[in-house]
Image: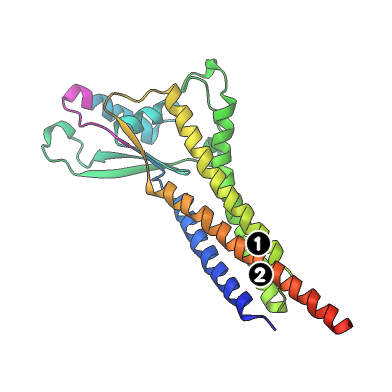
Amino acid sequence: MVDNRYATALVIACVLSLLATVYLSVAIGTQHWYQYSSPTVRGEANLSELRSLYEEFMEGEFDEKTYSDTLFRLNGTAGLWWRCVLVPTTPLWYKEPDLKMELNCRSFTVPEQFTPKYKEPGNHNSGEDMLRTYLWRCQFLLPLGSLGLVVLAGLTGFLACLCRSLAPTLGIGILHLLAGLCTLATVCCYLAGMDLLHRVSMLPDKVDGSLGWSLYLALVSSPLHMMAAALLLWAARSHSQNYYRMTAYRVA
């Protein structure tokens, strides 16, 4: 028999966990973690340069210097798995007074996620920047680890429901706590990595960078997982204390 307080705590924890998982999944799959605002460029010469940057961005080999410069100058957005630029739909960029813009994206492949970062982006002779390299890899691996922990917690909770037992609640709470910490670490690694990138690749004049809504979704999912963990840990501890009290009472 489960006390109503424990049942209420478990239901609220499940709702919080579900919301956090949805938010984190959407954040991982979207590209609006960081976005750049670039000034409008006029003149055929400048636009020809931007077209060549765009073509290299979409069709060329992976190079941090190339895609970073393109993001800076073409109102780019970057996420954990995607990099996108905002370009006109017409090839005659300089002849259209009112251009219609579209967002064109390219994904990071798994090998690209593990590509080393260099002290001078694009210059392989400058030496590997170990801090930026491992920050990038952590921001790729940690959210996957967070989702994996939540899936494991969900499977454990489902089996506990089948067995009608509250015994695994403590373990499920710890898994949610670790998932929340992994998500928070992902956001921290991403912000630190972007800050270091901007130090070695100076932003062009009149180009501004700002945080996107995808990052905020990930940031919100972390405390939701932690609140779910707190409820689960409270339910496990309270139920355990009551169980031992009832056992001692029966023995007496």
Residue placed most toward the observer, 79 or 63? 79
Tally the numbered discs. Answer: 2
* Residue 205, horizontal then vertical, whole percent: 28, 24
Q: Is residue 100 visible?
A: yes
The residue shown at (47%, 44%) is 81
Whether the residues at callouts 2 and 1 have beta carbons within 8 Å, the answer is: yes
Examine the rendered structure and indicate whether residue 69 appears above or below residue 88: above
Residue highlighted by disc 2: 235
Highlighted magenta segment, given as a residue range: 36-47
Label 1 SS: helix
Q: Tell me if residue 41 is in the magenta stretch.
A: yes
Is 25 or 8 nearer to us in this picture?
8
Left or right: residue 174 versus residue 127 is right
Q: Nearer the viewer, mark 2 or mark 1?
A: 2
Q: Quadrant of the N terminus?
A: bottom right
Marks 2/1: CA distance?
A: 9 Å
Residue 33 falls in image quadrant: top left
Whether residue 114 is visible, yes or no, is no
Q: Residues within 10 Å of mark 1 (few under 14, many from 20)?
A: many
| Residue type (three-letter) at the residue carrying disc 2 | Ala
Is 58 situated left or right of 226 in this image?
A: left
Q: Amino acid at mark 1?
A: Gly
The residue under the point 66% across, 69% down is 235
- Where is residue 55 drawn, in percent x and y? 33, 32
Question: Residue sitting at 19 percent across and 40 percent down?
Answer: 90
Q: Position of residue 247 (x, y in %)?
A: 83, 79
Is-magenta flag for residue 71?
no
| Residue displayed at 30% across by 27% down | 52
Question: Residue reaching furthest right?
Answer: 251
Q: Which mark is residue 173?
A: 1
